[in-house]
Amino acid sequence: MTNSECILNPGLFVKGIPHEIFEHYRKNAPLFRDKDTMNADRIVWNLVRYNDVLAGLKNVQVFSIQNHNELHEQTNSFGDSHHWHPKAMSLLESPEHTIHKKRFSSIAKKVNTDAYRVVVSELANELVSNLSNRGEFDAVDDFSAILTSQIVCSYFKIPKENHEFFRRLSSVFMGDTLLNAEVGSFSVYANKCPFNINETSPARNAMDMIKNYWGDAPWLDESFVKTADRWEVEDLGLQMFSAGMAGLRNCITMGVYYLSLNWKELKDNSNLWLSNIDLITEEIIRLTTPLMRIRRVLSSDIEMYGQEMKKDDHVFLWLASANTDPTVFQNPLEFVPFRSPNPHLSFSSGIHSCLGFSLARMEVEEVLKSIIINWKKLELVDSPVRFKSSVVNEISSMKIKIGA
Ligand code: HEM
């Protein structure tokens, strides 16, 4: 395989998830090697079949999350910062994983999600209504990017005047260029870690700020707020401002996309669509797969498909490929609004699965509901434009037209 054909090559993802390539690998080479784009000397393994990806996620003894993100490692690639936010991101790795997951678990409680649902619904209704006479606009810049920053910032009660700053911070965390993001001296171009070891890091200060704002938010457990140390605040903030904001933004943009393709059928049967909004949301999250692959490090040797993978080898578990595996999903590339069951892996699975899943689902549901109720017409003007990445399924713009 030449480098340009390498599945990790971001260029392959410009037109969307390269389903035909995954189909080829699922059929002919379900375990294959590739060059790590972040470290050309390292060969990584790739698993693409649903059952293998799921088995890898569940088998945390061998497919270890510990130190799975090489950005934790000592490296000079971030210029003046030697560690990538050294402590916060490792809280949820073993051996502290269970303690911290328990401490963070209030995020997923239904009572807390429901308390926040009211806020999300109000924010969504306000922006959706404001745009309803706008005619043509960009579904990312003018809608999903704004709405998600309002949603996530409101979670921490961050005042409106600071939303733009946190939106940029989120883009820096994700390493994306949606906003040509710059925060202080940190930019996505400068290749610097926004969480340097220096106490004056703007990202670190911002995470400290969160604690001043969130105060008595009813959706945050008071006991957690009172006892959270700075690393826990940083970790929660990081998750919310990275996956929480970008994942949500991309699910909402793709939600608009799939609703637009089914607009007539949806408007003719809006009660049916509204009463199945949970299934529709799930299907959008499956097809979007905001985080397309996750990295694991092997803690011991293991043989699969006649190949020897060695301890310390890195493995990519391709959620994007698992989510469209025809052995699990009938017509996997089709948007089937009421698909059920829908055992997609967009939030991962097993003990490390996403803690924000119920929050993310609720947020997407509320935004879709608001669109279905308030917009009379929804048409795609241009196809979605993608950000060049083989990690995140990021839509950077998508022109739409709405109106009477
Ligand atoms: C659509 C939005 C989101 C998607 C697609 C998403 C996806 C994921 C995935 C795939 C993982 C597993 C990573 C791995 O196994 O290495 C994960 C972990 C995690 N996510 Fe999310 N996430 C989203 C939103 C959120 C939100 C809103 C939060 C809120 C705090 C959150 C908190 C977390 C945490 C704390 C973990 C680590 C769990 C652990 O290690 O045990 N996520 N997420």
Image (spheres, rainbow, N blue to C red):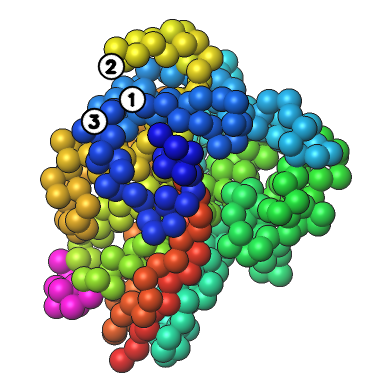
**What residue sits 55% from the left and 20% below the top?**
66
Kind of residue sitting beneath label 1: Leu
Q: Are marks 2 and 3 in contact (CB under 8 Å)?
A: no
The answer to the question of whether label 2 and label 1 lie on touching residues, with beta carbons closer than 8 A, is yes
User: Is the C terminus in the top left, top right, bottom left or bottom right quadrant?
Assistant: bottom left
Query: In the rendered image of this protein, does residue 204 appear above or below residue 49?
Result: below
Element at label 1:
strand
Labels 3, 1: front one:
3
Point out residue 106 in the picture as x, y percentages from the top left corner.
49, 38
Region in magenta: 263-272
Can residue 299 be seen here? The reply is no
Is residue 294 among what the camera can see?
A: yes
Give the secondary structure at mark 3: helix
In percent of width and height, residue 374 lies at 33, 80
Kindly indicate whether the residue at mark 1 contacts the one at mark 3 (C-beta within 8 angstroms): no
* Residue 31 disc label: 1
| Residue under label 2 | 305
Q: Is residue 81 magenta?
A: no
Distance between the Cα atoms at labels 2 and 1? 7 Å
Determine which quarter of the picture holds residue 223: top right
381 to the left or right of 34:
left
Q: Quick one: 8 or 173, which is closer to the camera?
A: 8
Q: For the residue labelled by badge 2, is the local secondary structure a helix, a strand or a loop?
A: loop
Q: Position of residue 13 (x, y in %)?
A: 42, 52
Where does the image place residue 395, in percent across and percent down from the top left?
Answer: 46, 61
Amino acid type indicated by mark 3: Asn
Decide if residue 337 is on the left or right side of residue 43: left
- CA neighbours of label 2 inside 10 A, class few (<14), some (14 to 19), many (20+): few
* Number of numbered discs: 3
The structure residue drawn at horizontal position 17% and vertical position 37%, both measured from the top left corner, is: 328
- Majority secondary structure of the magenta segment? helix
Location of mark 3 (residue): 28
